[in-house]
Amino acid sequence: MLEKLKETLARTRKFFAPIEQLLTRNLSQEEILNELFELLILADIGPATSQKIIDGLKQKSRKSGQADLKALLKQELIDILSSEPATVNDVFPAVWLLVGVNGGGKTTSAAKLASKYQSQGKKVMLAAADTFRAAAQEQLVLWGKRLNLPVIQGQTGADPASVVYDAVQSFKARNYDLLIIDTAGRLHTYANLMSELEKIKKVINREIPGAPQEILLVLDSTIGQNAIVQAREFNRFSGLTGVFLTKLDGTARGGSVLAVVEELKLPIKFVGLGETEKDIMEFEPEAFVEALLS
Ligand code: GDP
């Protein structure tokens, strides 16, 4: 798993190699920390989170008296990434909602989650609640065929909440374990989008108390710090339980993961590592940090 992660993070690792080199240089700790700040910014970690890392590192070094800055840095990064509880709420039956802007990887991520839990023996159903884009529905239907699982969809232009209602009825009637709902990522304004998502959530919760058990924000890691801006908009929608961070394989901006957790106070639960249904991992802070700095 570590090897796969390292390979996936190859482009991001290029920005962490200079950090590793710096930590072994024969400089004073103050000089190292000053340079480290610049390198963290270059690695797309963002100023606020970079500063937090420097402060944490100073504190750890003072407390422990330890001079191994690399070990301390690893621990600091793990502490930040573990600061939000990232355990997946995998009680079944469950309804999971995926939200996020178009192109971020929602449909692909829905298929990945479906495949993952299907391979664990769960009966999984998909619903296409993006009734604005016929193409989005078609894509999910294609995934359904490939994975051999049912996809509930509505007429183009139909009320997404009514498609979700139908999907939940079918889910209950057929005694499935997991319903994964793909939603629209584009409306004229975020306010409209958020109120639509609230309505969908209300419908689910009315039909199945306690659901949706997971509301995952799908974020594209290749857009780096812009992911934070996007996520702030979606954080206005109540009840996000975590992030599905996509396209880590294609990006040099994997460092933005740290800013996502630190600034949004949202745990990363899953990462996408490629375009097939198998390219998914549950996020583990220790493994991630080890892959970046080893
Ligand atoms: P949606 O509009 O949010 O539903 O996004 P899609 O699921 O259609 O994905 C947009 C594009 O990103 C597609 O070309 C996907 O194959 C690609 N994609 C999604 N996840 C990943 C990933 O983890 N890695 C890579 N390399 N590509 C991905």
Image: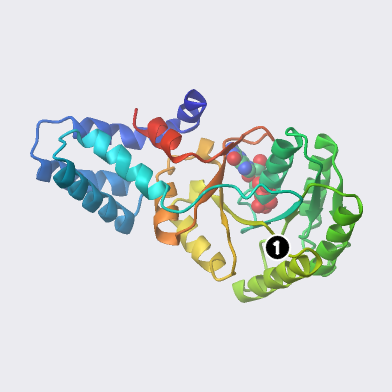
Whole-percent x and y of residue 214? 64, 55
Q: Secondary structure at mark 1?
A: loop
Whole-percent x and y of residue 167? 85, 58
As drawn, which residue projects farthest toward the top?
Answer: 3
As drawn, which residue projects farthest toward the right?
Answer: 173
Specify the quarter for ligand 1. Answer: top right
Q: Residues within 10 Å of mark 1 (few under 14, many from 20)?
A: few
Report the residue at 34% width, 44% height from top: 77
Q: Image quarter for residue 286?
A: top left
User: What residue is disc 1 on?
Assistant: 210
Report the residue at 59% width, 47% height from top: 88
Tell which of 212 and 184 is nearer to you: 212
Whole-percent x and y of residue 271? 56, 42
CB at mark 1 closer than 8 A to ligand 1?
no
Report the residue at 71% width, 67% height from top: 201
Question: Tag 1: residue type?
Answer: Gly
| Res 196 seen here | yes
Q: Tell me if residue 106 comes above or below residue 66 in the rendering.
A: below
Q: In this rendering, would 124 be left or right of 36?
A: right
Display coloring:
rainbow
Instruction: Name the quarter where the C terminus is drawn.
Output: top left
Q: In this rendering, would 5 be left or right of 151?
A: left
| Res 43 seen here | no
As drawn, which residue projects farthest toward the left?
Answer: 28
Q: Tell me if residue 120 comes above or below residue 57 in the rendering.
A: above
Q: How many marks?
A: 1
Whole-percent x and y of residue 105? 63, 48
